[in-house]
Image (spheres, coloured by chain):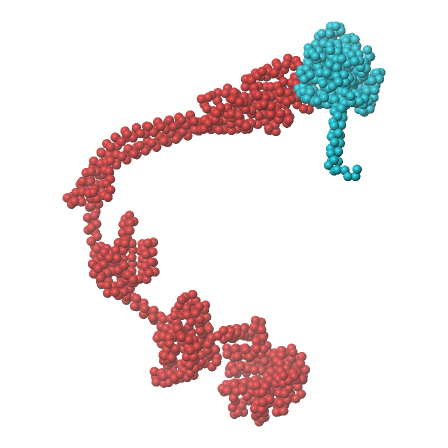
Chain colours: A cyan, B red
């Protein structure tokens, strides 16, 4: 038609506009990201755990998003916050993350006290808090039901027991001293030492409580010698471990006690802080995972990706490997959970986590990752010990 | 004197004494108590002030010590790993944190709180403290700045607290993990010092934003001190303001004042009664004295009895007695003085300060012709009213006012209206207290002295010979007329009259006769000069006359011309002889307002007189500027000429004399030429008359003569056998001067005299003396020829010419110049014939044109000189001339 009425033509454009807007709205809803929060101790000057966890989460999210995301095509996104290892900050960060729409869970990092601090708020806000590093028992061992706290990590109740058993087995220790931090983590470990030492055939006559920032353990070492112990059970992070190692290394070789350490030390740059002392002291650390010598295809694939993306020279050079591995697996589990829940509603996600099917992850094959009674995805069977090389590499010693 | 005579009735002395004593005592009491009160107040306030200062210092020291302790404690805690751990710990940390917090919270006025990074309390210890809203801003600021902060924080309904917040930074992270806050109640701490007990009213405020303690009202002292903690860079500072009320002190001082006032009132009542008694005692004897005085005044008693008591009243009584005795003695002593007054030759007048005549003496009555009754009680002005000049009256008043006396000449008026000049002396007299009591005037008649003075004055101003005013008188007369500013200045004419040839008269008639002539001339001038005039004799035969108030200058001028035109005025001497006199008069007109001094005026008139004389006397010559200039120039020429002669600055120039037939130079005429360094070239026409008049001509002649003689050998060497003519002055010829010079020359340069030709003018021959003739002969004897210059202008008698040893005639240039006229041509012809007859040679002067030369040659005059050939020229140029000259000028 040659003579179209101008008014009619305008109406036609209006209809077209409305149609386009409706389409855009639908596609926008379908592609709204689904968020996972991570509150890590980024601001801790010597900690490597937070970036390692983030690498694991991002790797998993890439895989998931590449396969089409969750909830029928919504991408997963990570939101991070920094608690600097300060519990008050962790609590505030958690409360803030809880405000975010479509955020289905928050991952907790290396500092157990921060996660413990968050627990009442997780319960109150009905937002799952999932520790991928913290080992303190109270994270999952508490009376709140339904519990919003989960863990895919070492747990002191079996981790610390394994450390004591390692001291007995490896160093023929009958007695050992314990060095524990004056925090809920330390108290968790101390409780295990007290409860389980006898069971593994070890006497722990001396437990020394230290505070973050303590500058010397010389008194403790002297006490250890006087107590004639054969080993030291250490629950510590990299800074205090370095202080201890240097003080042991300063002793004559025959007086240097072997140290079986909790894995907090691998969440940081211990090799940089301890330096040569690492090679002079028998020092072995409990772990749940290692890329080194790992034959699991999932582990090898993740190692290859982390090396490529992070520029690490070898599998052994990947820092805080357990953090990345735990985070990868947990992200995959959360993706499965949100899909099962069918929405980002947090109670539904929490419920779905308890009912997840088997999953073959980087760390292991999870027959049933979590159950209503068990919120820990790993168990004593996952324990291994590593030696810390001066390069920082964690080399497994005799996988069980 | 009865009391009723007082204009206002006063209270009795007794009452006044009584009241004064009580007033005095009351005032003293009041003053003493007021001073005491002021001293007490000042001391109390000063004490209060120093107490406040002391308390403030004590408080600030205490506050500073407390805060420094708190800060030190906080910093120690912040370095404790327990706190670092506690702040990163969670559940269960109360186990070790609570004991720590309890331990450090021992003092009720100091509370420590462990806060997380946002300022929330970490350990839930229940302590009375601040609401978080009050301190959170401080915590935020401290955390943001990462440094300790000290701030005052207010509390509702209570005094505020000081809050010291120190961020806790662990080695594990860069950001503070929490903060340790100390809240400190400075007021509680102060209370413990017992300084702020409620009854003292003292308060403190702690700033910057003051947190007060208690209310602050009026009447307060405030002291403020700034307190700095730690290093200045940490800026932990606050201001302590100590406030103390002094209201209670003021109330106490007011009560004291009231007490003192009451005491003063009480004292006055007591003193009043006492003072009445004192007054009665004091005035009892005074009353007695008053009675005695009344008796003396009433004449019932002459003297009071001597009072032996020795007090003031006694002294007063005795003094009164002494005064009365002394007054009687004084009256006795004054009697001779009164006699002097009565018998004095000086008129004496006593006046009151207002000028009322109180007393006069008989001498005054005699001098003035008044009766005593006509004067007493009248104004003294009656004696000289309208007589003294106002200026003098003012001067007398001023002098009396400033110096107390005046002395001088004035006039008084007699009763008959005549005035008498008096030497007058008036002086103020005052009593011993300096109060003006009036004037004593004395004066004496000085009429005699004045008339003598007038006579002396006249003598000084009058010429004794003629009775005319003398020079001094006319000077005095002229002075006001010359005053440019003065109203007296007016037009006038001044004449300088000189009697011609008085010397001749004196010579003829002796000085007696001369004086007689002067007297006659004075009378003649007085009679004949236009009236009014002021004629004076200056000196000798000189009279000066001024003519003023003439109707028209022109008519005056004509009258004067007529008076002085007469060449001969006949004068009859007392001896009976008659002679003729004439006057030379210089006149000058002065216009009112012109600024001229008397001397300038007289010089002007003198110049005019000189001109009149130069113009041949017996005439009046008016001064004009040109005349003045001419006079000046003449004086200048004369002055410079004297100098030039001294310096030998005149030089001979030589004008060639030729044989006009062939142009051969036969002679030169030496002519004096003068170029002055200041005046430039001066023409002989100007300086020769001056020289003749002043007698310098002889000196010039001599100078020229010597120079010519010096040039002569050179000239002769160049022009062999030429003659050099030279001129001389009559004076030199009179006194053998020329001969002496020539003789001297002849002695040294033999033969040179023959080269000389002496030119004398025809007028020289007019009054020749034998001495002159003898000298002329002597000169000729030396070989010098004589020529008569300017021939034809004078009048020589032929006989004398024939008798003169003259060799040549020089025809005056005026004849040559007019030779084209027949009459002059004939004169020249006659002269030529005459000279031919007398055997004289002839030279024509002033030959300027070819026509003149031809005419002269045609008449047989062969020799001539003039500009046709050459002007007079200096020797150097002469020497450059050739032996023959061509006529150089065309006919003009």
Quadrant of the image occupied by residue B227: top right
Asked whether, in this view, residue A254 is left or right of residue B633, the answer is: right
Residue B223 drawn above or below residue B320: above
Closer to the camera, B677 or B827? Answer: B827
Q: Is residue A8 above or below residue B605?
A: above
Relative to B422, say whether B583 is above or below: below
Q: Residue at x 72, y 9 (%)?
A: A193
- Which quadrant is home to the C terminus of chain B? bottom right
Q: Residue at x 39, y 69 (%)?
A: B476
Q: Is residue B254 visible?
A: yes
Residue B752 appears in the picture as rendered: no
Residue B732's x, y, as percent? 52, 81
In the image, residue B444 sits, relative to residue B196, either above or below, namely below
Nearest to the observer: residue B773 or residue A399: A399
Q: Is residue B448 left or right of residue A166?
A: left
Q: Position of residue B271 (x, y in %)?
A: 28, 30
Counting from the top left corner in percent of width and height, residue A233 is at 74, 12
């Amino acid at each position: 038609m040659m003579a179209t009425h101008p008014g009619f033509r305008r109406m036609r454009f209006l209809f077209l506009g409305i149609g386009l807007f409706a389409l855009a709205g639908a596609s926008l809803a379908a592609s709204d990201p689904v968020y996972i929060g991570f509150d890590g101790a980024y601001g801790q000057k010597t900690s490597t755990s937070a970036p390692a966890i983030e690498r694991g989460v991002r790797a998993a999210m890439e895989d998931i998003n590449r396969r089409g995301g969750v909830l029928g095509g919504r991408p997963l996104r990570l939101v991070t916050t920094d608690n600097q290892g300060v519990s008050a900050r962790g609590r505030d960060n958690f409360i803030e993350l809880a405000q975010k729409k479509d955020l289905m869970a928050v991952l907790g990092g290396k500092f157990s006290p921060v996660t413990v601090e968050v627990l009442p708020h997780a319960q109150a806000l009905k937002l799952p808090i999932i520790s991928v590093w913290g080992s303190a028992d109270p994270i999952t061992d508490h009376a709140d039901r339904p519990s919003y706290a989960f863990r895919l990590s070492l747990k002191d109740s079996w981790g610390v027991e394994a450390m004591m058993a390692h001291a007995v087995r490896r160093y023929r220790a009958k007695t050992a001293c314990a060095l524990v931090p004056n925090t809920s983590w330390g108290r968790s470990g101390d409780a295990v030492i007290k409860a389980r030492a006898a069971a593994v055939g070890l006497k722990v006559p001396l437990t020394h409580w230290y505070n973050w920032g303590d500058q010397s353990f010389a008194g403790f070492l002297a006490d250890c010698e006087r107590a004639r112990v054969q080993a030291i059970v250490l629950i510590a992070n990299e800074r205090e471990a370095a202080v201890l190692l240097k003080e042991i290394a300063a002793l004559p070789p025959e007086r240097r006690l072997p140290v079986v350490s909790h894995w907090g030390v691998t969440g940081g740059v211990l090799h940089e802080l301890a330096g040569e002392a690492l090679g002079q002291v028998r020092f072995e650390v409990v772990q749940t995972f290692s890329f080194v010598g790992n034959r699991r295809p999932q582990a090898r694939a993740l190692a290859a990706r982390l090396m490529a993306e992070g520029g690490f020279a070898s599998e052994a050079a990947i820092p805080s490997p357990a953090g990345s591995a735990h985070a990868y697996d947990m992200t995959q589990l959360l993706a499965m959970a949100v899909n099962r829940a069918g929405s980002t509603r947090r109670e539904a996600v929490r419920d779905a986590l308890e009912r997840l099917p088997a999953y073959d992850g980087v760390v292991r094959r999870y027959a049933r990752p979590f159950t209503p009674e068990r919120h820990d995805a790993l168990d004593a069977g996952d324990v291994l010990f590593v030696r810390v090389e001066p390069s920082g590499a964690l080399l497994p010693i005799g996988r069980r | 004197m009865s009391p009723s005579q007082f204009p206002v009735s006063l209270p009795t002395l007794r009452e006044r004494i009584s009241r004064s004593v009580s007033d005095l005592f009351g005032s003293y009491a009041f003053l003493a108590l007021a001073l005491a009160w002021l001293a007490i107040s000042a001391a109390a306030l000063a004490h209060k002030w120093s107490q406040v200062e002391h308390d403030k210092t004590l408080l600030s020291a205490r506050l500073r010590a407390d805060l420094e302790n708190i800060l030190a404690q906080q910093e120690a805690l912040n370095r404790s790993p327990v706190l670092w751990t506690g702040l990163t710990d969670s559940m269960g940390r109360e186990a070790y944190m609570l004991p720590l917090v309890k331990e450090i919270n021992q003092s009720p006025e100091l509370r420590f709180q462990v806060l997380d990074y946002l300022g929330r309390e970490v350990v839930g210890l229940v302590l009375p403290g601040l609401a978080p809203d009050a301190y959170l801003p401080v915590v935020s600021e401290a955390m943001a700045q990462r440094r300790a902060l000290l701030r005052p924080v207010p509390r509702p309904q209570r005094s505020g607290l000081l809050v010291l917040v120190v961020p806790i930074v662990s080695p594990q992270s860069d950001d503070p993990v929490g903060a340790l806050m100390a809240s400190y109640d400075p007021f509680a701490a102060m209370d413990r010092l017992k300084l702020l007990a409620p009854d003292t009213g003292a308060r403190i405020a702690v700033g910057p934003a003051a947190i007060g303690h208690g209310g602050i009202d009026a009447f307060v002292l405030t002291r403020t001190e700034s307190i700095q903690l730690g290093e200045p860079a940490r800026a932990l500072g606050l201001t302590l303001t100590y406030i103390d009320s002094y209201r209670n002190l003021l109330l106490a001082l007011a009560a004291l004042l009231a007490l003192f006032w009451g005491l003063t009132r009480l004292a006055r009542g007591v003193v009043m009664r006492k003072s009445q008694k004192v007054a009665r005692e004091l005035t009892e004897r005074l009353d007695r004295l008053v009675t005695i005085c009344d008796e003396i005044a009433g004449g019932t008693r002459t003297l009071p009895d001597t009072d032996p008591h020795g007090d003031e009243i006694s002294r007063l009584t005795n003094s009164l007695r002494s005064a009365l005795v002394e007054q009687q003695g004084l009256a006795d002593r004054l009697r001779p003085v009164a006699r002097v007054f009565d018998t004095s030759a000086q008129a004496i007048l006593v006046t009151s300060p207002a000028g009322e005549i109180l007393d006069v003496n008989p001498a005054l009555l005699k001098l003035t012709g008044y009766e005593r009754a006509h004067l007493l009680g009248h104004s003294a002005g009656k004696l000289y009213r309208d007589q003294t000049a106002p200026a003098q009256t003012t001067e007398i008043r001023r002098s009396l006012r400033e110096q107390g006396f005046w002395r001088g000449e004035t006039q008084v008026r007699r009763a008959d209206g005549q005035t008498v000049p008096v030497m007058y002396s008036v002086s103020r007299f005052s009593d011993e207290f300096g109060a003006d009591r009036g004037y004593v005037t004395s004066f004496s008649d000085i009429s005699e002295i004045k008339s003598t003075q007038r006579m002396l004055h006249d003598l000084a101003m009058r010429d004794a010979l003629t009775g005319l005013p003398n020079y001094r008188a006319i000077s005095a007369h002229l002075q006001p007329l010359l005053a440019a500013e003065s109203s007296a200045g007016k037009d006038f004419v001044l004449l300088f009259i000189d009697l011609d040839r008085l010397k001749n008269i004196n010579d003829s008639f002796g000085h007696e006769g001369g004086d007689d002539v002067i007297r006659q001339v004075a009378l003649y001038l007085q009679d004949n000069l236009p009236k009014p005039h002021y004629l004076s004799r200056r000196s000798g035969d000189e009279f000066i006359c001024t003519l003023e108030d003439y109707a028209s200058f022109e008519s005056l001028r004509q009258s004067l011309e007529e008076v002085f035109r007469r060449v001969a005025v006949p004068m009859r001497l007392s001896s009976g002889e008659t002679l003729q006199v004439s006057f030379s008069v210089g006149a000058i007109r002065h216009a009112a307002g012109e600024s001229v001094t008397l001397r300038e005026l007289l010089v002007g008139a003198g110049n005019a007189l000189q001109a009149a004389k130069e113009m041949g006397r017996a005439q009046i010559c008016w001064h004009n500027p040109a005349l003045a200039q001419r006079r000046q120039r003449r004086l200048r020429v004369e002055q410079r000429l004297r100098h030039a002669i001294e310096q030998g600055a005149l030089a001979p120039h030589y004008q060639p004399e030729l044989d006009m037939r062939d142009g051969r130079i036969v002679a030169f005429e030496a002519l004096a030429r003068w170029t002055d360094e200041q005046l430039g070239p001066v023409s002989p026409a100007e300086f020769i008359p001056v020289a003749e008049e002043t007698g310098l001509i002889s000196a010039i002649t001599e100078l020229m003569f010597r120079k010519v003689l010096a040039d002569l050998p050179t000239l002769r060497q160049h022009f062999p056998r030429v003659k050099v003519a030279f001129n001389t002055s009559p004076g030199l010829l009179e006194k053998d001067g020329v001969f002496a010079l020539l003789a001297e020359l002849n002695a040294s340069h033999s033969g040179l005299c023959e080269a000389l030709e002496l030119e004398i003018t025809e007028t020289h021959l007019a009054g020749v003396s034998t001495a002159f003739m003898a000298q002329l002969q002597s000169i000729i004897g030396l070989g010098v020829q004589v020529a008569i210059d300017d021939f034809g202008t004078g009048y020589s008698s032929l006989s004398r010419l024939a008798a003169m040893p003259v060799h040549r005639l020089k025809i005056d240039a005026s004849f040559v110049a007019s030779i084209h006229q027949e009459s002059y041509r004939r004169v020249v012809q006659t002269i030529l014939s005459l000279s031919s007859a007398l055997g004289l040679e002839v030279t024509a002067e002033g030959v300027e044109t070819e026509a003149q030369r031809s005419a002269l040659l045609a008449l047989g005059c062969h020799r001539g000189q003039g500009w046709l050939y050459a002007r007079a020229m200096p020797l150097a140029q002469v020497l450059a001339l050739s032996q023959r000259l061509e006529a150089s000028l065309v006919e003009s």
